[in-house]
Image (cartoon, helix red, strand yellow):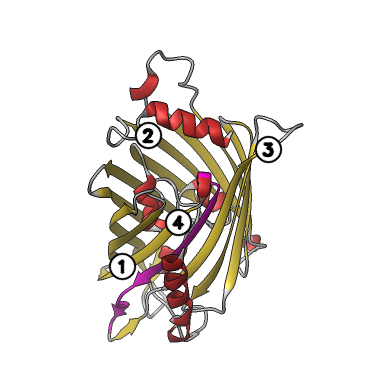
Amino acid sequence: MRALLVFTSAVFLASPAFAIKGPGTTSANFLKIGVGARPVALGEAYTALAEDVNAIYYNPAGLAFLQRQEATLMHNKFVEGVSQEWAAYALPTQKYGTYALGIQMLRVKPFDAYDRFDRPSGEVSATDLAATIGWGKELGADRRWAWGGAAKYISSKLYTRQTTTVAADFGVLLRGPEDKWRYGASIRNLGRGLKFLEQRFDLPASLRAGVSYHTPLDYPFSGSYLTWSAEGIMDVDRYPTGAGGLEFSPVKEMTIRVGYRQNQDSGLGISAGFGFSSLEAGFVENYAWWPEFLLDYAFVDYGPLKYSHRVSVTIRFGGYKGNTYDRKDRVQHELKLW
């Protein structure tokens, strides 16, 4: 706990260096658009809850707790003419931590272009891309601690002009007893900004610290569980904000979610969604090797810009890392939480 407090204190003591420059003063702002339908539905309050392959985006320390290989694909029908794609893969190992790859892309539908005399001159398109390599590792004999980092290659292209840069993320995560409480902190998008023509614009660096809680419910909701998360956010281009999310599962295979982000650029900051997981247990004999499938959906209210719709498909497959945490151990752990 002491290490987490030290890291979190360092994060927020460093916040004065994040001189508030105001909205619209940073580049590569597509990095602010959340990935993964589950985290987005929870208001992106995922720094402490990061427990899947999407941790490479929110808090790379969370990668350390993955037990199987995991891959995800997400499509975001964003505002009119703009779409977002996200793909990620994680490979856990027993000795060396978990390695992950992620690719995020934002595309703008080609639109009409005009010269300085207001004459049509064809079409203009824009594409932003971030390719990420991440790593997270458990610490301590009880493996409750984790830390991790990620390196990003960032590219932004408008018509025939393209600019690139690199950035880094760092994070820590602590799991409480029985994995009910989690505490996390992260620093995201540290690096030199993108340079357009002769001027360089800072990246949307962000400091975050959060907490989450997961618990089974008592009668009359026996067999259900509740998860909530909350976090504080310090972005380089705005004053401190917050986010929170709530997740309710009436049965293990179905989840309903709602979230809120303070001071969202447009709209009320409200998000919601749902998720389903596969029913392999009980249907497949010796299902230790059987893949798990997850389908998640989220929508976000953007006010005058209407709604954004995200759909994620995730698969977990392969054996559990190491011999000390096999399928039987995992099932027993889940039964304790339930």
Residue at disc 4, secondary structure: strand
**Marks 3 and 4: CB-CB under 8 Å?**
no
Query: Where is residue 9 drawn, in percent x and y?
Result: 47, 75
| Lower sequence index among marks 1 and 3 | 1
* Distance from Cα at disc 1 to Cα at disc 2: 26 Å
The residue range painted magenta reads 178-197
Which of these two is toward me, 231 or 331? 331
Instruction: Tell me the mark number nearer the camera, choosing from 4 and 1.
Output: 4
Question: Would you name the residue on which mark 1 appears?
Answer: 168
Q: Residues within 10 Å of mark 1 (few under 14, many from 20)?
A: some
Residue at disc 1, secondary structure: strand
Question: Would you name the residue on which mark 2 appears?
Answer: 316
* Mark count: 4
Please tell me the numbered disc located at residue 174.
Answer: 4
* Distance from Cα at disc 2 to Cα at disc 3: 26 Å
Residue at 61% of width from left, 54% of height from top? 245
Amino acid on which the number 3 mark rests in the picture: Leu
* Distance from Cα at disc 3 to Cα at disc 4: 23 Å
Q: Is residue 181 magenta?
A: yes
User: Dividing the picture into quarters, in which one does residue 285 lie?
Assistant: top left
110 up-or-down from 247: above or below: below
Residue at 49% of width from left, 35% of height from top? 295
Query: Where is residue 28 drawn, in percent x and y?
Result: 38, 69
Amino acid on which the number 4 mark rests in the picture: Leu
Question: Would you name the residue on which mark 3 appears?
Answer: 217
